[in-house]
Image (cartoon, rainbow, N blue to C red):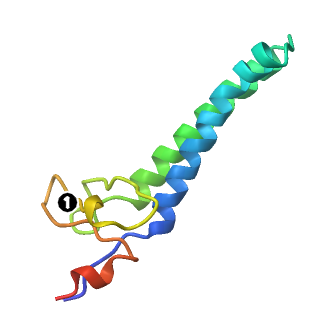
Amino acid sequence: MVMKTLKRKWARAVTILMVISIAFAALPVLMYDVLDTGSPVWGILGVTGATVGLIAMLVVRCVFLKCPCCGKGLARPYWKASEIHEQFCVKCGKPFVFDDEEDAYKE
């Protein structure tokens, strides 16, 4: 039986999008408090960038990191494989296996 796997690149994409969202959220603070600029453009840019990043992160997670067996559970994204990151679908109980972890789950 061939087990369907999740792609690690999508887990990394979610992590990168989260970091980008945090950076955009910190942008207005940096511009107003540290560099002492008074333009409202930085606030708008920060809120817009953080919102777009969070929406993109949720879309990538819901589309590419859902359970390959039942399609209902969502895997937590991790940058690299590790035994402590072993996780299972809360709906069907099957393990989430990423493409770089396939060897550990071969029978």
Image position, residue 63 (x, y; %)? 42, 57
Q: Is residue 67 above or below residue 35?
A: below
Residue at 42% across, 61% down: 64
Q: Is residue 64 above or below residue 37?
A: below
Q: Is residue 37 above or below residue 70?
A: above
Residue at 54% across, 43% down: 18
**Residue kind at label 1, given as amino acid type:** Phe
Label 1 crowd bin: few (<14), some (14–19), many (20+), radius 10 Å: some
Q: Is residue 31 left or right of residue 60?
A: right
Q: Nearer the viewer, residue 5 or 28?
A: 28
Q: Is residue 71 above or below residue 59?
A: below
Q: Nearer the viewer, residue 83 or 52?
A: 83
Q: How many marks?
A: 1
Which quadrant holds the N terminus?
bottom left
Query: Which quadrant would residue 21 be assigned to in this image?
Result: top right
Which quadrant holds the C terminus?
bottom left
Image position, residue 70 (x, y; %)? 21, 63
Q: Secondary structure at mark 1?
A: loop
Image position, residue 56 (x, y; %)? 55, 46
Q: Is residue 84 left or right of residue 49?
A: left
Q: Is residue 58 left or right of residue 53?
A: left
Image position, residue 47 (x, y; %)? 65, 25
Query: Which quadrant would residue 98 be assigned to in this image?
Result: bottom left
Q: Is residue 31 left or right of residue 96?
A: right
Residue at 46% across, 44% down: 58
Question: Residue at label 1?
Answer: 88
Query: Which quadrant would residue 71 be assigned to in this image?
Result: bottom left
Residue at 29% across, 71% down: 97
